[in-house]
Amino acid sequence: MLFYELNKIFTRTGYKLLLGLLGAILIFTAFYHIQSTQYVYPDGTSISGLNAIQKLKEEKSQWNGILTEEQIKKVLQTNQDILEAHPDYYPGTTDMTLSNQVYSLQQSYDDIRDMINQSYRLFGELDYYLIDRLSPDQSSSFYKNRIEGLENYLNSNKELTENQKNYYRKQYQENKTPWQYAYQEGWKVLTNSLPILQIFSAIIISLLLAPIFSYEDKTKAKAILMSSYKGKSKGTLSKISAGLWLTIGIYTIVMSVYILIILGAFGFDGAFNPAQTNFFIGWKSPWNISNIQALGIMLISGLVGSLFFSSITMFISYKSRSTVIASTVVFLLILLPDWLTNYISNSNLITFVKLFPDQLLNSRAHLSGFTFLDVQGMVISPLTIMNILYFILSIVLLYLIYIFAKKEYLR
Amino acid sequence: MKLNLINLTKEYSDIKAVDHISISLRPGIIGLLGENGAGKTTLIRMLTSLMKPSAGKILLDDKDIFKLNDDYRNILGYLPQDFGYYPDLNPLDYLRYIASIKAIKPSVARKRIKDLLQVMSLWEVRNKKIKKFSGGMIQRIGIAQALLNDPKILVLDEPTSGLDPEERYRFRQLLSSLSSDKIILLSTHIVSDIEHIADQIILMQKGKILDSGSVDQLIQNTPIRAWKIKTDLTNASLYKQNRLITSFNKSNDKEIIRMLCKDSPDPAAIPDECTLEDVFLFYNRKKAESHVVL
């Protein structure tokens, strides 16, 4: 029965095209990230693509090891030496050849440069050239800055509760330093690009599922199903199962293929680097996890998000009997809340909107920022709440479809 | 096996689509005859457990079909008036899907599907998408799906729409061969579909049963007879205005008119054999054409 439900979806030309589109987005995203990686030669010329990735990996791997203050000092000294060797260079120079020549010498420690810039700005605005104004002697405050920056932030923030503040302090104290650093380009690309792929996957899966119930009304096939022996019970269950299998299957295939392409191209190195070393999660992150754990959280959240959007699509498809309504509502639910936050100033309302299910498809934002909530004295990540809440809601929605369908009669 | 409809009623706000119908259905072919809007489809939807009645009961051997639930649907085959299919599936996959919904064992389903596709002359096109089929072919798939579980109760709503005369003939033959142990309810507004094969005919109008019985009984129960008269064109025109005319043929300056009325309209009129179609026309037109002399 499940096979025929899936067959009904996949035999339709429009839906084959949708799957093709998702495949094209996957390939384009992977190709874009591979092709946009550049390696700059000492003469200022550059290459991109797989060769660039290989050369960059060799360069960056020189700095693999524990990020002790001594290592930070070495980076700062190297940076100073490079600048001294190029007296004509200054930040923002219009001499692109010179700029590229300097960058070719700096690119090996670009990840560490990002960390240093974030450390010494003390939670201030990002300044790519901040490292250029630091002396090697300042290396000793590399990790202290993180604690100091947090204190500055907590003291200036009046919206956080004491529980939240204490939780962040605890997380920072428990964060084991010095950090282990290894070349981690693949993990950076994944944490940066996975959310967009998760959003596209959720949208396309929802579009595929939008007609799963309404199609029976459109084709007038429902009367036969409802008057058949197991049409209301197993027939409905098989549709729900098909929806779940399709969601899990497509999501797993898309994510696995993408991760394999990216890590295949960039390498698996850096999986166990602390997430704070990853620019796209960020130095400030209160999550004491590694790159691979961060990816795991993103994948699980994305899967729960996709399951929820699939469930709500199927529910609307069943109740409204309209593919268009099901598609439109879910499309808006995925894209609208995040856009709305640009126009909301009330922090409580923003916190509320940040609990909408679309956030599960953008879990990186929750790994990066101070988004933990104080719920009756318990400090908990919105991601934990959302994963549990929307998983339960998905089950409830699917169960309701089954119950409604079993008791359904024409009017 | 007996299907008892007791005081069955379906109301939509102020309209009674089915109005206190009580009748007993036994194995055989039962023709449900009525104009569009007579309440046939609503009655069928209740008989197929798709729709709950506003009042009354449907009992299968004294058990309420809505309580029997899946057990009732297990012995039911149904072809709706608007047969819904999946245009991108082929007949083979479509029937396999319906077989799985009807929980037919795969080995049984395989044989049954092959047999039905052969009987319906669809075996050669079993791998072709249904959307490429003609209306008649699609209707034959509909009939096949209704017969898939070898149902004890077979409900067919306007099954011959879209079928050509040859297909209609074959369909009637098929029904006749099935009818010995099944209740076959065939709803139609085409008299010829049931005239020669139905054991019982139910005449419906405005949600009520006007009459029911065999073709002969219905003809006997109808208080009119058919008459033929050959007359001049002036008289023919008068007859057409105030009589229930079933047919007329011009022949030179004369016209042969066939009409329905209780008594001979003219000494020259000769009685003609009354048919089920006459009964159907009488009930449906006598109200619409209330000025006619019967």
Image (tube, coloured by chain):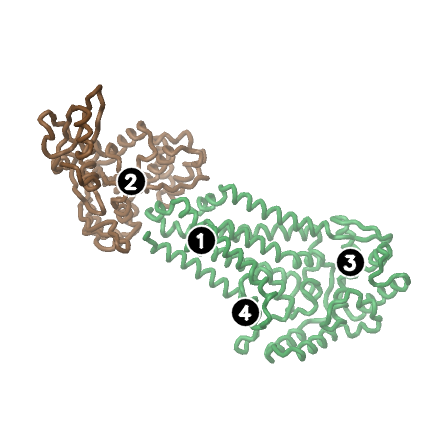
**Secondary element type, mark 2:** strand
Residue corresponding to mark 3: A60
Q: Quadrant of residue A274?
A: bottom right
The answer for which chain carries disc 2 is B
Task: Say if mark 4 contacts mark 2, CB within 8 Å.
Answer: no
**Number of callouts in the render?**
4
Above or below residue B45? Residue B91 is above
Residue corresponding to mark 1: A317
Is the residue marked by circle 2 packed among few (<14), some (14-19), or many (20+) residues within 10 Å? many
Mark 4–mark 1 Cα distance, whole angstroms, equals: 27 Å
* Marks 2 and 3 on same chain: no
Sequence-wise first label, 1 or 3:
3
Above or below residue B247? Residue A51 is below
Whether residue B193 is visible: yes
Sequence-wise first label, 4 or 3:
3
Which of the chains is brown? B
Q: Quadrant of residue B188?
A: top left
Marks 4, 3: nearer the viewer: 4
Mark 4–mark 3 Cα distance, whole angstroms, equals: 41 Å
The answer for which chain carries disc 4 is A
Mark 2–mark 1 Cα distance, whole angstroms, equals: 29 Å
Task: Say if mark 4 contacts mark 1, CB within 8 Å.
Answer: no
Is the residue marked by circle 1 packed among few (<14), some (14-19), or many (20+) residues within 10 Å? many
| Circle 3: residue type | Lys
Residue A369 at x, y percent in the picture: 64, 68
| Circle 4: residue type | Phe
Whether residue B177 is visible: no
Identify which residue is drawn at 44% across, 36% down.
Answer: B131
Any mark on residue B156, and which? Answer: 2
The answer for which chain carries disc 3 is A
Residue corresponding to mark 4: A352
B82 relative to B219 in the view: left or right:
right
